[in-house]
Image: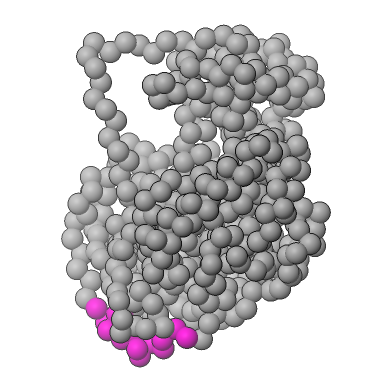
Amino acid sequence: MRRARTTTAVAVALAASLAASLAAAAPAAADPRPAPDDALAAFHDQEVDWTRCEEDVLRTLECADIEVPLDYADPGGARATVAVSRRTASDPDRRRGVLLTNPGGPGGPGRIVPVSPAETGGAGIIGGERVAEVYDLIGMDPRGTGASTPRLDCGAEYPMAPPRPDDSEFSGLTRGVIAYQRACAQADGDLRPHMTTANTARDMDVVRAALGEERINYIGWSYGTYLGAVYGSLFPDRLDRSVMDSAVHPGGIWRDVFTLQAPAYSRNVERYTAWVAEHDDVYGMGATPEEVVAVFEETSRRLAEEPRDDVPGLPEGGAYGDDEWDFLVGVAARYQGQWDVFTGDLAYFVHDVPFPEAPVAADDPAPAPEPAPELTGNTDLLTAVLCEADWPERLSDYYRDMRRVREDHPFGVGVVWHAPHPCAFDSSAPAEPLVELERDGYPAGLVIAAEFDTQTAYEGGPALADRLGAALLTVEDEGGHGFYGVAGLDCVTRAVDAYLVDGEAPGDLACPGTPVPDPRANGTLSAPGGDPDTAGAAIARARADREAPPLGVPVVR
């Protein structure tokens, strides 16, 4: 088992919840083994063969494969390929280089980032923003995912814990995690040690060199903020302007970063239940936050005994029980811009009324196609990357944390990140120490964090901005994740464009989040049920959030 390591600052902040066996130690500097630039000349000087992308959703972009060493300590050994995409600057006279991007994950494919959602009916992130005028936008599928090769595949399903399992479920969850880790070791054991953030950052620098650029500009979301900080720490003279959107806390990589999610969901539930109580005449769920929570708890107990089978999107023969409900409440709570619509879904459960029947098609519909790999994350790469850090080893400490968290934070992810993790059972040591994050030689950038973000809790924003000496943009009263280019968050987009496009030095700033709806004014919902036209919206969002990379942003908008 793996020896635990966390930073002193995070150990102090989370002392009540972390086990006494955790050692407090700062991450060491990067291992000096990686080859110098002259040993990488063959990779830096390779020709990039751009062709029109084959995937329909990427049809407006050019794509290429760039070779990188699988092991940077042995550049003459096995090779990997990194799949990249390019959208050339629409105003060549104003072009100021390339903007490398990463949508987070870990394990999130990135070639789709330069796509404009307007061109594809929603898929894509920044192809329609002002940055596309002056930069060649570069998307990249990190090593191990998307169209990059080799792609990790454990051949086993990751056993995610429910939000609040009882003690009788603990051993089964642990056995599932151990079986998953063993399957990964058997399938990809020789590859997984090379799937690290530091190596992905080194791949980025090979991409930079192969594109003939002296420096890159960068925007990363969620996990991509940590990746960008690692790149800047390893290659400070090769990074120019940088934006870190939805910042990862630089301390406590990785478990302590993820365990911040449960209390972040609870903060959202607090503000959401206050809003529901304000509109008790509309929803009939309670006149105080405490009454609303009590109703949610009673609904959870009822669903544990009598799961629903009429829920939109439920697979044939499936059941919607208390585990799904507990997560659904947390998801509904974080997206305040849709509180009216999402509360309609909750009303069907709370008031125990049937969901409206879906229209019957004249013919049997064709089965939905499998999600394209350029749109989906890779959980097997996620777990490999997380194993670049040490994890606690004692099961009794995990179980103690789970018992506390299921009581204190029952809605949202709950105990998911407090439960035993596959990395706790990885017998191999990390391939190299974590990179010490610092900004020494590249310009101060911009860090973005939202007050109620559940995936990268707000405290990560000030911490990363302080570590990098960067400006901090706070999105107030907002529970979403990923903010540049998002409709309704024009203040954020203007600030990023002013920096990346116009060259204005970033400064600390507060921007308003998505407005909270007024169900009376909208006339959208009324108890006991919701609007039939929007029934299932919250359930679909919860399903998408559950399946998405935990530190990634949506690539469909």
Frontmost residue, 262 versus 103: 262
Q: Residue 460: x and y, percent? A: 66, 57
Specify whether residue 289 is in view: yes
Q: Which quadrant, please, contains the C terminus?
A: top left
- Where does residue 248 sit, x and y in percent of width and height? 60, 58
The residue sitting at 41% across, 52% down in the picture is: 378
196 in the magenta segment: no
Q: Quadrant of the N terminus?
A: bottom right
Q: Residue at x 29, y 68 (%)?
A: 81
> Of residues 495 and 111, which is closer to you in this image?
111
Give left or right: position of 81 versus 305: left
- The residue drawn where x is 73% and y is 65% is 22
Decide if residue 526 is in sight here: no
The span shown in magenta is: 33-46
Establish if 354 lies above or below 264.
above
Percent position (x, y) of residue 122? 36, 38
Residue 372: quadrant of the picture: top left
Q: How is this picture coloured?
A: one colour
Q: In this rendering, is residue 191 above or below 522?
A: below
Furthest-bottom residue in this view:
38
Residue 126 drawn at (x, y percent): 40, 51
Q: Quick one: 516 or 148, which is closer to the camera?
A: 148
